[in-house]
Image: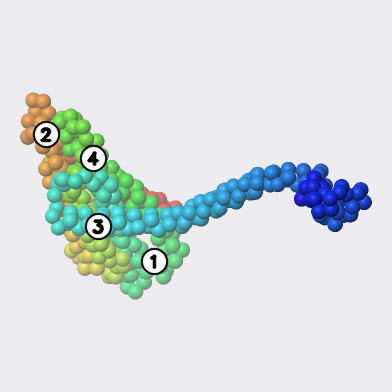
Amino acid sequence: MNKEDWLDYFEAVNGRDPSAKEIAEALAAGEFQNDAVAEGSKEKNELTPEPVAAVSEEAETKVNQEEASVAKQADNQGAPHQQAEQLKEKGKGYFAWFLEGLKRPAAQSANSQFAYGAVTLILAALFLAAGLVNYVHRIFTSIINMTIGGESLKMNEPEAFSVVEDAVRTNFGFSKVIVITVIIFIAYALVAAVPALLDKFSAKSQEKVTFLLGKYVAYTPLLAAVNLLIFLLSFLTSAKLIVSSDYSYQIASSFGSIGSNPFEGLSSVSHLIKEVPAIRSIQTVFIYLTLLSVVSLAILIVAFLANIKVSLGSLNNFYVRLIAFLVFILIIFFMDKSIAANLLGGLDGIKDSLTKLY
C-alpha cells in the first residue's frame, strides 16, 4: 500500500497520528511504499505491456519466417522430383505418339505435335548421317586393316598405320556426322515447312505456322525408323580385309582414285568386287543402304505431296503440287550435293595425310 493508505490504517487502529519514528520503522519494514517508488512502479507497470507486445510480435514474425523458409526448402527439394515426373510424362507421351506413327503412318494428323515432330526429324537426320559416315569409315578402316599374305600395314609399318588411322577417324568421325546431320535436317525441315507455309498463306489461316507444321510431321516416326535401319546395316560392312597378294595393288589404287575421280574409282571397285570375295560385303551393304534410302525418300515424297491440298489463285491443286514437287527435287538435289561434297572432302583429307606421310 502507499503512504496515505498506511496513515489512514494506523489512525483507524491506534486513534492517533503516527510519529516520525513510527513512519520510518513502518517504511523500513515494508508496510507501505514511498510515493516516489510507487509512482515509478506504476509507470513501469504501465510501460511493461508495450515491450511484451513488441517481443510477442517479433517472435511471431520470426516463426512466420521460419515456416516460410521451411516451405521454400520443401518446394526446392520437391522441384527436381516434379521436373523429373514431368519429363517422364512427356517421354511416355512421345513414345506413345512415335509408336502410333509406326502402326498407322499418316501424312497429317488431327493433333499438332510440333515438338515431337522436330525431335523425330533430328533423330531421322542423325541416323541417316551416322549410317552414311559409318559406311565410308568402315570401308577405309577395312583397307588400312587389310591383310595380304599374312602381313598388314599395322604389322609392317605401325607408324604409318597410326597416321592413316587418325586421318580416317578425323575425316570420318563424329564431327563429320554432325555436319551431315545439320545438312539433312535443314532439307527435312524445308520439306516439312513448304506444305505448312502454303496452307498458311493460301487459306489465310489464323493458326501459327508451327501449329500447322506440327500436324504435317505425322510421317516422321516411319522416316526415323527407316533411317535407323540404314545406320544399323552400315555395321555389316567388314572392318578388315583378307585378300590375296595378287589384288593388293589394284585394291589400293582403286580406293585411292575415288578422291580424285569418284566415278572411275567406284567403277574400278565394282570390278574388284567380282574378283575379290573379301570386299563383297561392301557391295552388299551398299545395295541395302541404297534400297533403304529410296524407301526413305519415297516416304518424304508421299507425305510431301499428300500435305499439299491448296490452290493458289488461278493455279489449281495439280499445278501447285507439280511446282511444289519441283521445289522438293531442288531441296533433295542440294542436300545430296552437300553431303557428297562433305564426304569427298573427307577423302581429300585422307589423301593429304598420305601425301605428307610419303
- The residue to which callout 1 is attached is 153
Q: Is residue 232 visible?
A: yes
Q: Amino acid at mark 4?
A: Phe
Q: Amino acid at mark 2?
A: Val
Which residue is at the front of the view, 52 or 313?
Answer: 52
* Numbered disc in front, either 2 or 4: 4
- The residue to which callout 2 is attached is 310
Q: Amino acid at mark 3?
A: Phe
Which residue is at the front of the view, 149 or 317?
Answer: 317
Provide residue 75's location: percent of width, then percent of height. 45, 54
| Label 4 SS | helix
Residue contact at pointers 2 and 3, CB within 8 angstroms: no
Checking the image for residue 211, the label placed there is 4
Give the residue displayed 57% in from the left and 48% down from the top: 61
Provide residue 120's location: percent of width, then percent of height. 26, 51
Mark 4 packing: few (<14 Cα in 10 Å), some, or many (20+)?
some
- The residue to which callout 3 is attached is 95
Q: Quadrant of residue 137?
A: bottom left
Q: Single out the residue that lies furthest toward the top.
A: 314
> In this image, 195 relative to 91: left or right?
left
Provide residue 204's location: percent of width, then percent of height. 17, 29
- Mark 4 or mark 1, which is nearer the start of the sequence? 1
Provide residue 216's location: percent of width, then percent of height. 18, 43
- Mark 1 or mark 3, which is nearer the start of the sequence? 3
Give the residue displayed 9% in from the left and 28% down from the top: 315
* Numbered disc in front, either 2 or 3: 3
Give the residue displayed 84% in from the left and 50% down from the top: 15
Seen in the picture, residue 24 relative to 138 is either above or below; the reply is above
Mark 3 packing: few (<14 Cα in 10 Å), some, or many (20+)?
few
Mark 1 to mark 4: distance in Å? 57 Å
